[in-house]
Image (spheres, rainbow, N blue to C red):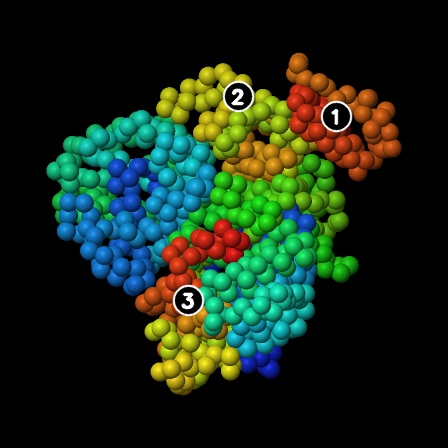
């Protein structure tokens, strides 16, 4: 539709200013890059972020003037103290939030950048992991005088765990090592060796000086031996997660929208792949499939939609699909998982308790957990695991979970967007841990020894006597069983629910 | 062949996603509608999130009785034209006690007629979630704000009870007595708001556009004499100036800027080339150090 046609549709009585779209005013940037900075104040983190803002961004003039007028200088130089630009970011405005991530925004000529900053102090694992979970690219900062350290190993391990694919090693303070290429090459080689262990798609080392600005936004005159990109050039070329989402279509259903008798739309955001009108989609939990007949948005219907787009899908037949379902193509489905193996970053101050009554949150589902066990803890420096039964704040735990009912879950390494998980305390609602699914299985497991087992027969003869075998009643059966389990766990009883007998889902066993 | 989405497309989708998550997870949400440009965008995003269904929750406006008259007219017309369920709440007790922004310190006025009034309204209707248009770029104390910001009973913001947010997973399970503020526009900037208003051809309150208006200069700030309650003091006089507003609130607490920007294009151009960031026009922020932070702990946005 042309601009003129739109104008004709405007109601004429509105006292609206004349709207003439001027393209350069509606400057839409080519995308958003979420940038995590890892490192300590000693590595020059604040100065680097300040320098990025000063050199590359569209700062307000009053913010620049504040820095100039303050008279504060970067240590040992006659240059302004760029770290002043971080206002809310640094710990001086500590609010006491347990997990403390600050967000700051700046634009270059082509892209929006979002700086995600988390404190670098000792309790940083959970802070960094939650910050990194939002990042498209991470800058790992090292001091050229000390190179790759234990902390660098921990940082890269956390980045890999939560799915960051692009990493930049910023070798800072090159001025303090005489701009030496040998020093840089040694650190670069150590970094390469370190990164072989991980699943990064791109790991680049850049020599720079945040204080003097060398290779931040302007190429360095002091390091003519370096021919690679400046930090900003490199960041501008780094694609975002959403643009690199896989080709496997996933659509977690958030809610059902209705408009009179004619419209029942499944609302959600495409998390990976794409969908177009005419595609057959399936709900892996009910095994029901249907054809997409309309992709609705308020801006007009679409022919197709891809990762990152929030839409509503109308299907040709009214299959019983609601919140929590994940629509996919029939041949590439998520698993209707009964058990999940996962790696969790423990976020809560409260330690893991096998009897607490946790719930599992996936993209749009909240699932009762019938049994959860910690199997091991992961050492981020060596990547070795050691057996364990419990965990606490900042631990990386390997856990095995039996679900109270099936849920659509992917393996994170294959389809990250639908393979992420939160552990939620069912009573307080608190987020205990964030994690990734490493293995999912559609077969239920027999409960382990030492647990009180809520037998299905026992429940059927008493509490659930009024229920039939209809699908809604079977759902109600599990809901009650889970409620009982939650109450018993709160009273300190280790409980497991006997898994339901396998349901014949009509699927070809060969699939 | 579709072009890759622009940053505004991505922000819009993210906001829609947040609206839908909150509407699905909370029992009784409400949209806090303050009539300004951020609320205009917030409301537009809510309509998009549930299209073709009508917005499935009411709008709440906390009226201090000191809003610009143009704001109230705009509010009522918007609700009528879009068929929205609008709730207007005023702290009648505060009005009876004579609290006002001219004789009282801005912090007292704000506490009684905004913060207390908001709490009253949320409690009266039993809302468990309130959408707001706050952005992380607005002010330092908001840079760490969550998308789902939890409040203990009594609407207290307890820093230790704030939940970490990872990936796109939003955990809205409420503990006993908890409520939540939801900020779908957390990642928008002021420039994005204006660019989006221009792109989506949204109508905003005329006060954002420059016009000749009666003004009084007080403490170096230009105030508009919106009605007879604001009178010049000794040495002050009412003069016509061509002014506009970058933020809107209670008129005696909202400073104007002198400007010729009387079209949306001119406003956007002025904003993008702005010399000062937006909160310098909001007088309550200068009232005391760390003002925003304190107000937040007390339950104001």
Q: Position of residue A205 (x, y in %)?
A: 27, 37
Marks 1 and 2, how far apart at CA: 28 Å
- Horizontal side of residue B7 vs B124, given as left or right: left
Residue A354 vs residue B53, the one in the foreground: A354
Say which residue appears at 60% left-offset and 38% top-offset.
A429
Chain under label 1? A
Residue in view at x 51 percent, y 33 percent:
A348
Please give the name of the residue rendered at 74% of the width and 34% of the height, measured from the top-left corner.
Answer: A479
- Quadrant in which residue A499 is drawn: top right
Occupied quadrant, residue A366: top right
User: Which element type, helix, strand or loop, lies under badge 2?
Assistant: loop
Label 3 sits on a secondary structure element that is helix
Closer mark to the observer between disc 1 and disc 3 = 3
The dot on residue A390 is 2
Q: Using the image as rendered, state which of residue B97 and residue A73 is in the foreground.
A: B97
Q: Which mark is residue B184?
A: none
Identify the residue position indicated by label 1 in the image: A500
Placement of A446 over or under A418, stated as above or below: above
Is residue A20 visible to the viewer in this orientation of the structure? no
On the same chain: label 3 and label 2?
no
Residues beneath discs 1 and 3 located on the same chain? no
Which residue: 49% across, 26% down?
Answer: A392
Residue occupied by mark 3 = B283
- Give percent across and percent down for residue A486: 69, 29
Callout count: 3
Q: Residue A407: where, in percent of width, then height?
A: 65, 34
Q: Is residue B146 above or below residue B132?
A: above
Name the chain under label 3.
B
> Can see residue A256?
yes
Mark 1, secondary structure of its residue = loop
Instruction: Please tell me how crowded label 3 is: few (under 14), some (14-19), or many (20+) other residues with Cα within 10 Å.
Output: some
Tell me the CA gap for discs 3 and 2: 52 Å
């Amino acid at each position: 539709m042309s601009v003129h046609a739109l104008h004709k549709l405007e109601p004429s009585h509105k006292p609206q200013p004349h709207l003439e779209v001027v393209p350069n005013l509606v400057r839409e940037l080519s995308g958003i890059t979420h940038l995590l900075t890892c490192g300590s104040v000693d590595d020059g983190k604040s100065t680097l972020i300040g320098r990025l803002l000063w050199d590359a961004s569209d700062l307000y003039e009053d913010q620049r003037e504040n820095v100039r007028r303050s008279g504060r200088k970067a240590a040992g130089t006659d240059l302004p103290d760029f770290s002043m630009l971080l206002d809310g970011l640094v710990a001086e405005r500590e609010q006491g939030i347990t997990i403390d991530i600050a967000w700051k925004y700046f634009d270059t000529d082509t892209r929006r950048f979002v700086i995600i900053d988390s404190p670098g102090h000792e309790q940083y694992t959970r802070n960094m992991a939650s910050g990194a979970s939002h990042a498209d690219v991470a800058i790992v900062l090292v001091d050229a005088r000390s190179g790759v350290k234990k902390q660098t190993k921990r940082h890269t391990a956390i980045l890999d765990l939560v799915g960051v694919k692009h990493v930049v090693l910023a070798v800072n303070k090159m001025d303090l090592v005489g701009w030496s290429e040998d020093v840089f090459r040694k650190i670069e080689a150590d970094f390469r060796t370190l990164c072989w262990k991980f699943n990064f798609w791109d790991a680049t080392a850049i020599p720079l000086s945040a204080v003097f600005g060398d290779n931040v936004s302007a190429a360095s005159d002091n390091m003519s031996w370096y021919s690679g990109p400046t930090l900003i050039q490199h960041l501008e070329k780094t694609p975002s997660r959403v643009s690199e989402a896989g080709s496997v279509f996933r659509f977690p259903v958030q809610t059902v929208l209705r408009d009179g008798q004619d419209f029942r739309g499944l609302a959600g955001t495409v998390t990976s792949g794409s969908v177009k009108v005419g595609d057959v989609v399936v709900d892996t939990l009910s095994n029901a499939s249907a054809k997409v007949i309309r992709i609705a948005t308020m801006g007009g219907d679409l022919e197709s939609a891809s990762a990152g787009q929030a839409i509503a899908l109308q299907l040709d037949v009214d299959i019983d699909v609601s919140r929590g379902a994940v629509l996919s193509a029939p041949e590439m489905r998520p698993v209707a998982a009964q058990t999940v193996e996962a790696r969790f970053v423990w976020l809560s101050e409260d330690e893991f308790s096998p009897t607490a009554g946790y719930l599992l949150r996936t993209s749009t589902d909240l699932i009762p957990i019938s049994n959860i066990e910690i199997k091991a803890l992961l050492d981020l420096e060596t990547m070795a695991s050691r057996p364990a039964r419990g965990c606490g704040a900042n631990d990386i735990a390997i856990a095995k979970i039996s679900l109270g009912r099936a849920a659509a879950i992917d393996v994170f390494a294959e389809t990250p967007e639908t393979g992420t998980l939160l552990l939620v305390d069912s009573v307080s609602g608190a987020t205990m841990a964030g994690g990734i699914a490493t293995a999912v299985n559609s077969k239920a497991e027999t409960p382990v020894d030492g647990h009180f087992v809520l037998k299905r027969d026992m429940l059927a003869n008493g509490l659930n006597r009024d229920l039939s075998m209809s699908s809604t009643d079977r759902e109600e059966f599990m809901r009650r069983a889970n409620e009982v389990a939650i109450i018993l766990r709160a009273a300190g009883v280790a409980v497991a629910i006997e898994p339901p007998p396998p349901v014949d889902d009509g699927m070809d066993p060969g699939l | 062949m579709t072009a890759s989405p622009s940053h505004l497309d991505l922000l819009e989708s993210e906001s829609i996603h947040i609206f839908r998550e909150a509407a699905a997870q909370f029992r009784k949400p409400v949209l806090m509608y303050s009539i300004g440009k951020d609320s205009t965008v917030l409301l537009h995003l809510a309509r998009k999130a549930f299209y073709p269904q009508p917005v499935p929750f009411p709008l709440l406006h906390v009226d201090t009785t000191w809003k610009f008259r143009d704001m109230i007219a705009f509010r009522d017309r918007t609700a009528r034209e879009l068929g929205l369920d609008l709730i207007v709440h005023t702290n009648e007790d505060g009005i009876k006690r004579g609290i006002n922004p001219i004789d009282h310190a801005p912090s007292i006025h704000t506490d009684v007629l905004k913060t207390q009034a908001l709490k009253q309204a949320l409690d009266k209707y039993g809302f468990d979630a309130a959408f707001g248009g706050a952005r992380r770029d607005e002010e330092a104390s908001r840079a760490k704000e969550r998308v789902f910001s939890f409040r203990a009973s009594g609407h207290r913001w307890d820093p230790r009870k704030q939940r970490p947010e990872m990936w796109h997973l939003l955990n809205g399970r409420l503990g006993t007595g908890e409520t939540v503020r939801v900020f779908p526009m957390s990642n928008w900037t002021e420039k994005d708001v204006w660019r989006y208003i221009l792109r989506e051809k949204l109508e905003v309150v005329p006060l954002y556009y420059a016009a000749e208006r009666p003004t009084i200069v007080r403490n170096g700030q230009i105030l508009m004499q919106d009605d007879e309650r604001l009178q010049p003091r000794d040495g002050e006089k009412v003069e016509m100036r061509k002014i506009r507003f970058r933020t809107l609130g209670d008129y005696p607490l909202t400073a104007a800027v002198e400007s010729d920007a009387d079209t949306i294009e001119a406003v956007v151009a002025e904003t993008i080339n702005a010399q000062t960031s937006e909160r310098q026009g909001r007088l309550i922020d200068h009232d005391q150090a760390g003002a925003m932070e304190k107000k937040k702990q007390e339950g104001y946005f």
